[in-house]
Image (cartoon, rainbow, N blue to C red):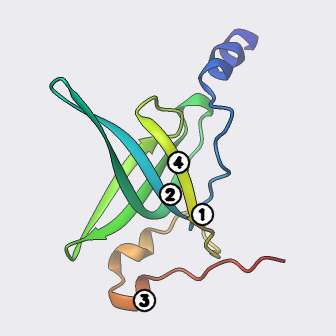
Amino acid sequence: MNLIDLVESTYVKPNMPELKVGDTVKVHINIVEGTKKRIQVFEGIVIAMKNGGSRQTFTVRKISSGIGVEKVFPLFSPMIAKLEVVRHGDVRRAKLYYLRDRVGTARNVKEKKEV
C-alpha cells in the first residue's frame, strides 16, 4: 500500500485550490492542434466530484449558446494548465445533477457567505 501512496503522491499538484461541488470554476486546458498549442478556458459550475486518490475527477457544466455542455476533468491531469475558483456555491447535495433540468434563473446556485 505504501508503494501506491508513493506513486500517487508524485502526481499531486501542490498548488491546487480547494474545489467543492457548487463552485464556479475556470479550467484552463492545454489544447494541442497539430504543431500548435493554445490554452482554452472552460468556465462553469462543478456538479460532481468523484474521489479516488490520483484518479480524482470533477464534472463541470456550462451553458453554451443555450445548450448545456458538461466535461469531466481528471483533477491531476497535465492537460490542466490552471484551475481558478471564481466563487464558492452554497449547496446541500453531493451531486447537482438536478441542474440539468432547470431553465433560466432556476439553475443559479447561491453564493456562500463568508463568515
Q: Which residue is mark 1?
A: 94
Q: Which mark sits nearer the N-terminus, 2 or 4?
A: 2
Q: Position of residue 61 (x, y in %)?
A: 38, 63
Q: Are marks 2 and 1 in contact (CB under 8 Å)?
A: yes
Q: Which mark sits nearer the N-terminus, 4 or 3?
A: 4
Q: Which residue is mark 4?
A: 83
Mark 2 or 4: in front is 4
Q: Position of residue 30 (x, y in %)?
A: 35, 36
Residue plotted at (55% across, 38% down): 56
Q: Which residue is mark 2?
A: 48
Q: Secondary structure at mark 2?
A: strand
Q: Which residue is mark 3?
A: 106
Residue sitting at the far left: 34
Label 3: how many residues lie within 10 Å, few (<14), some (14-19) or many (20+)? few
The type of residue carrying mark 2 is: Ala
Cα distance, mark 2 to mark 4?
16 Å
Residue sitting at the far top: 3
Q: Secondary structure at mark 4?
A: strand
Cα distance, mark 3 to mark 1?
18 Å
